[in-house]
Every structure is written in structure tokens, then in C-alpha cells.
Image (cartoon, helix red, strand yellow):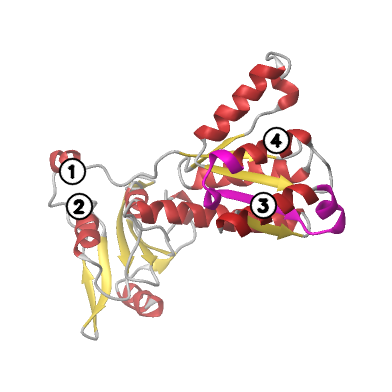
């Protein structure tokens, strides 16, 4: 459909420009210009799109004092709820219907009063992840970086809970620190543990507490795939395996080779987690 749209716009005197794409709140796939007129097209491979994508796309209304005519391109006509939202936010639609190329031009038929009166779109609930690892390992720094990147992209979807013991011990007694950690484990919906060759009584204690406080499906352990790590955490791993034999419950056990492998696995797991949260709340996440 991209080539069809390019041909149609060329016949109307529009040419493709790369100048404005990065300015959009949600970047379109194609931007056309003809003098003071600008058109943008966002392509979808499926017949759906998250509502917050539509909202972000609609937020860019002018560029250099030029109004933008925005479109979303679907393989076929979207469901009524998405169709109506596009109309409401002044976004045109392009889709195939009965073998024909159909274009619905943007419309301003909804007033701003009607928009304000509408129920607010779905927002992902605050989700907290307890981060348990040795304080100095690179994987801990990578975890914070990846979660922060996802937060920026999806508007604070995930909140990490990481107790920095070297800082906290300056203002808290050991008993208060342990209480703070336990409250954090209870508060957080998910527990993320990272195990490598370095033994850590603090991490071991946190994981045993998590096994008591959390449902097993909400516990994720990244374990470095080498003999030294298996030896260091031998008793803990045996305990988890025993719980599986006795209760048929197990945690998410994800081996990794190095930091790059860890980052890839964590990014995939976090995105999958966000997707599952959306599904449980009856929302779509792509």
C-alpha cells in the first residue's frame, strides 16, 4: 500500500520529505509536503493499534506553523472503537474494503467539549519490580538502564525497587534496612533476581523471602550459565527444584552467557510482562 499512496500523493503534487518525521510525537512512516501543506501516514501491518499510539500521533498538529493532515493506514477497516477514536482525534484512515482502496479524510466534527467528556483511555497501572543482585555487577546497572529506557518509551510503565545497601546503611540500622527490604519485596508485584559467580548472603536472603512472599510465576531469576555460578548457588537452586517437586511450582529461570545476552533476555521479559499486564486489564499492547 505504501507505493500506492506515494503514487497518489505525487499526482496531487506532494513529494516525500524526511525533514519533519522526527518532530512528531509518534513518528510516521511517510511525510509528504506540497508548499504549506503537510500530510503524514502511519502504516500498520495488522488491523489494530494501541489507543495511546493514536493519541500520541494526534498530539502533533502543526509543524513550522503548517497544519498536518494525518492518516493511519490499515490493511482493512479497523474496529468501530478505533475508527471512532481516529475520527475524534482528527486522524484520517486509509484501508482496503472489498478490494477497493478507501480513504476517510480527517474530520473536526467532534468538539473539544465532547473530547473532555469522554472516559480517559486505558493507562497501564503502576507496576513495581524488586531488583535483587550484587551491588557492583554490570548486570544491575544494565537492568536499571533498560527499565529506564522502557519507562521513557511507555510513560513510566515499570518502577524498579532497588535497595542500594552502601547508601542505606549510612542512614539505617541493619534491622531497619532488612525491614525496608522485606516491605519492598511485599510491595512489588514482581521480583527480579540476578545470580552470577559472586556469593551474596543479602541476595540469597532476598530470594528466600521472595519465595515465601510472592507467587512463583512473578519471580524471575537470571542465572549466569557457568559452572562457578551453579556451584555458588547450588543450595538455593536445589531448594527451588525441591519446591517444584513438592508443590509443582517453579520460578522463571533464565540462563544467560554474558551481559549482552542478559540485556536481550531482560528486555524481552520486561516487554512480555507489560503485554501480559495489558491483557489482564482488557487492553491491547503490540
Residue on which disc 4 sits: 205
Q: Indicate which disc, 1 or 3, sits on the residue closer to the N terminus.
A: 1
Q: Distance between the residues labelled 4 and 2?
A: 53 Å
Counting residues from the N terminus, which is met first, the one under dot 4 or under dot 1? 1
Which numbered mark, 1 or 2, is in the foreground of this view? Answer: 1
Instruction: Assess disc 1: are there few (<14), some (14-19) or many (≥20) residues with their C-alpha within 10 Å of its C-alpha.
Output: few
Tag nearer the camera, 4 or 2 = 4
Numbered disc 1: secondary structure? loop
Q: State which mark lies toward you, 1 or 3.
A: 3
Against 283, residue 202 (above or below) is above
User: Label 4: how many residues lie within 10 Å, few (<14), some (14-19) or many (20+)?
Assistant: some
- Circles 1 and 2, Cβ within 8 Å, touching? The answer is yes
Residue 26 placement (x, y as % from top left) = 42, 53
Query: Mark 2 sits on what residue?
Result: 88
Quadrant housing residue 136: top right
Q: Is residue 228 magenta?
A: yes
Query: Which residue does the numbered mark 1 point to in the structure image?
Result: 118
Amino acid at each position: 500500500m505504501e507505493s500506492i499512496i506515494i503514487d497518489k500523493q505525487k499526482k496531487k503534487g506532494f513529494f516525500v520529505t524526511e525533514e519533519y518525521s522526527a518532530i512528531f510525537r509518534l513518528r510516521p512512516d511517510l511525510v509528504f509536503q506540497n508548499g504549506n501543506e503537510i500530510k503524514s501516514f502511519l502504516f500498520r501491518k495488522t488491523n489494530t493499534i494501541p489507543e495511546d499510539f493514536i493519541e500520541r500521533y494526534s498530539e502533533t498538529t502543526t509543524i513550522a506553523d503548517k497544519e498536518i493532515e494525518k492518516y493511519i493506514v490499515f490493511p482493512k477497516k479497523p474496529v468501530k472503537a478505533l475508527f471512532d477514536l481516529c475520527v475524534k482525534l482528527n486522524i484520517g484512515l486509509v484501508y482496503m474494503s472489498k478490494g477497493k482502496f478507501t480513504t476517510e479524510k480527517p474530520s473536526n466534527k467532534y468538539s473539544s467539549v465532547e473530547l473532555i467528556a469522554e472516559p480517559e483511555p486505558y493507562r497501564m497501572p503502576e507496576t513495581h519490580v524488586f531488583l535483587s543482585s550484587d551491588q557492583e555487577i554490570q548486570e544491575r546497572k544494565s537492568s536499571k538502564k533498560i527499565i529506564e529506557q522502557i519507562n521513557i518509551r511507555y510513560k513510566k510503565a515499570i518502577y524498579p525497587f532497588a535497595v542500594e545497601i552502601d547508601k542505606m546503611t549510612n542512614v539505617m540500622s541493619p534491622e531497619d534496612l532488612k525491614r525496608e527490604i522485606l516491605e519492598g519485596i511485599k510491595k512489588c508485584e514482581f521480583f527480579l533476581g540476578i545470580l552470577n559467580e559472586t556469593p551474596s548472603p543479602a541476595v540469597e536472603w532476598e530470594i528466600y523471602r521472595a519465595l515465601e512472599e510472592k507467587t512463583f510465576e512473578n519471580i524471575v531469576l537470571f542465572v549466569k550459565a557457568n559452572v562457578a555460578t551453579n556451584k555458588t548457588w547450588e543450595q538455593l537452586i536445589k531448594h527451588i527444584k525441591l519446591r517444584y517437586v513438592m508443590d509443582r511450582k517453579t520460578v522463571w529461570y533464565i540462563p544467560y552467557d554474558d551481559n549482552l545476552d542478559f540485556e536481550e533476555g531482560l528486555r524481552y521479559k520486561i516487554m512480555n510482562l507489560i503485554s501480559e499486564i495489558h491483557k489482564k486489564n482488557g487492553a491491547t499492547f503490540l
